[in-house]
Amino acid sequence: MSLATIAGTDVNVDDEGFMTVYDEWTEDHGNVLASNIGIDLTERHWEAIRFLRDDFKAEGETPTLRRVTTTGGIPTKELFQMFPKKPAKKMAYVAGLPKPKGCV
Amino acid sequence: MTATQITPTIVPDFGDDAEQRKMVFICSKGNLDMAYPALIMANGALNEGVEVDIFFTFWGMDMINKGTWNDLQFSMLGNTAMHMPGSSKHIPQGLGGLPGMTGYATGMLKKQIADLDVPGIPEFLQMLHDMGARFWACQLSVDMMDLTKEDMFDGVEDIINVSEFIELSDGAQTVFI
């Protein structure tokens, strides 16, 4: 575990750069993390990120892509457009959450 | 847990600049328990940004045939890995041949799969299609089973012969199930 300075604050990150403390994340961090991986956040991106944050808080784990679609209501195709190639992991990174563990 | 040092910002490598990886799954079985492995692995591969093609042949056609895809079965017969619930004791093979046992075992398996929030076959195929997978049906199987494209999942790209399949799987990691 180490600290990194993101959006002007020191936050805990893992070896890959994922934030590890739920309450350290703010939307400012989300903006910086997204720009780190070349994504400009639109309101639709934020809907997905907020769903991830709320669902993690309620369920204790990062939702899978399927769950973002079936429970969060954002179509799978759109998630692939917004967070290209690896949407589940990229969303988790931007939302300051661990990578999803579920297989489906 | 003690945070000890300030690191320069590390950004995860999501492989955006890596060479495009390709996987092909060949589905040749129509048993419920043999339908899921390819779909689950394909889902994982698509989540990892891998390009995925799925080729259906022989009994695997039942997975994309709209007349059968909701009714794939699971039989205990020939499966020596069947155990009493919550135990390592084997279920005698003969029990699997009793009337109604296939239906019972199928119902149990479907429930276990649904409990894990894994979708049924038609919904799973649609999900993979939305993720960008391409589906192909085997010409020989289509002829043998007297099917048409209209009988199949709408997401099937085309009915192709084996040489076309070999062409499209060029350079891909291939998984046969």
Image: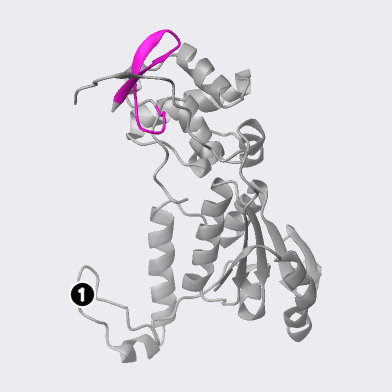
Where residue B8 appears, as percent x and y from the top left, is 41, 20
Q: Is residue A96 or residue A73 the one in the foreground?
A: A96
Is residue A46 shown to the viewer in this render?
Answer: no
A42 left or right of A63 in image: right
Quarter of the figure with residue B163: bottom right
Residue under the image location 39 percent in, 90 percent down: B97
Give the labeled residue for mark 1. B88
Residue under the image location 19 percent in, 72 percent down: B87
Quarter of the figure with residue B28: bottom right
**Residue A54 magenta-highlighted:** no
Name the image quarter holding the C terminus of chain B.
bottom right
Residue under the image location 80 percent in, 73 percent down: B148
Where residue A8 appears, as percent x and y from the top left, is 42, 7
**Residue A58, placed above or below residue B107:** above
Q: Which residues are magenta?
A: A2-18
Residue type of the residue flagged with mark 1: Ser
